[in-house]
Image (tube, rainbow, N blue to C red):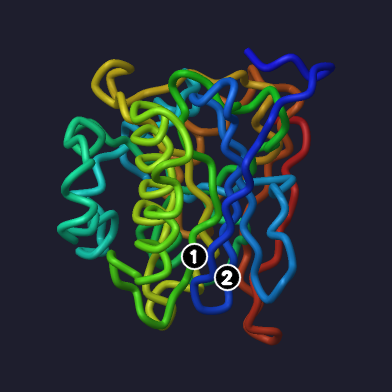
Amino acid sequence: MLNPDQSYFTRILRWPIENYVHEIGINVMMPEYITTGLYLNDELLKEPEYLYKFYSPANYNFESIEAPYLYFGDPEQFNDSFDCIVSENDYIQKFLDKKYLDDIGICNFSTVKTKKMWTFYTDKNQGFAVKYKNDKYFIPYSDKIAIRSHVLYLNKNVPDHPNLIEALKSIEGKHFPEPVKLWQHQVLMQHDLCRKEKEDFQWESEYRMITFGREKINRRMEINPLAIDSVYIGHRMSKENQERLLQILKKYSHVKVYKIIPNPKTQKFEEVRFKNI
C-alpha cells in the first residue's frame, strides 16, 4: 500500500466534460493506485459525509440490515437502459479488456433524501431509507472497490466523448505498455461507468461504488454496523414490516430511527423520531 509519509511521482490528467472537469492522478511508481477528483463549475465535488440508500419492503432488504451488508448489482438490470454503456470507439476497442465489463457490480447511493427518492425507490413509501456514515471505516478503496465517485449528469451523455478519447491518447508513450493499458482502463471506467443523462436523472444526486468482482463477493459486501447512522421508515410501511424492522434495529442502540410523516400544509415530509425502541 502507499506510504503516506513518502513522496510519489504522480502525473495529473485533467479533461473537461461539459461543466465538469475530471482529474486523475496517475502514480508512476505504483501504477495500480490512482487519485481522482471531480469538479463541477470549477468547484470540487467533495466526498459526501453521509450517503443515503432507499429500500423497497422486499424481504432481502430487511435481511441486508440485519446482516448487515450492501448489495452490488449488475448494471444490465438497472432502470436506465443507457447506464454503464462503454464506448465502441475503434481506438478504445484496441486496448479494452472485456473482463472489466463481465463482472461489474455497482452499489448506488444518493447524497440527498427527497420526496421523489421515496416515491421511486421505496415502492411508494412502503419501504425505508438508511443513512450511512461515509467515513474511512465504511467502504474504502481496496482490492474489492475500484471506483468511488459522484455520478456526472451530462446534456450529451455519449460513451465516446471526444475529450475522453483525447485524454486516453495522451497517456500513450509516457511509460511502459502494461501500466499505460491499466491507466487507460481506469480513466475509461471512471468516465463510462459514472455518467447519466442530466434531464432524466439529475434529481437522484447519485454517488456510486464499483467493483469488478461482483461474483467473487457473491454480490454482497459486509459492513460495520457502526456505519449505519439512521433509519427512516416510510409512512405507508405495513404494521408487520414496521415491527420487523424495529425488532432488527433493537440490537443497534446507536442507530437513530425516524418515521416519515407527510405534512399536507407544507407539502413536505417530516421526520418523527422513535424513542425507546
- Residue drawn at x 36%, y 80% is 156
Establish if 210 lies above or below 93. above
Mark 1 touching mark 2, by CB under 8 A?
Answer: yes
Query: Looking at numbered disc 2 in the image, what kind of residue is underneath it?
Result: Tyr
Residue occupied by mark 1: 152
Where is residue 147 drawn, in percent x and y? 48, 38
Residue occupied by mark 2: 20
Foreground pick, 100 / 129? 100
Task: For marks 1 and 2, give the one nearer the viewer.
Answer: 2
Where is residue 252, by image quadrant?
top right
Label 2: element kind: strand
- Residue drawn at x 35%, y 62% is 165
Where is residue 217 drawn, in percent x and y? 33, 17
Q: Is residue 90 left or right of residue 169?
A: left
In the rendered image, the quadrant that contains the C terminus is top right
Query: Disc 1 and disc 2: Cα gap in Å?
Result: 8 Å
Where is residue 63, by image quadrant?
top left
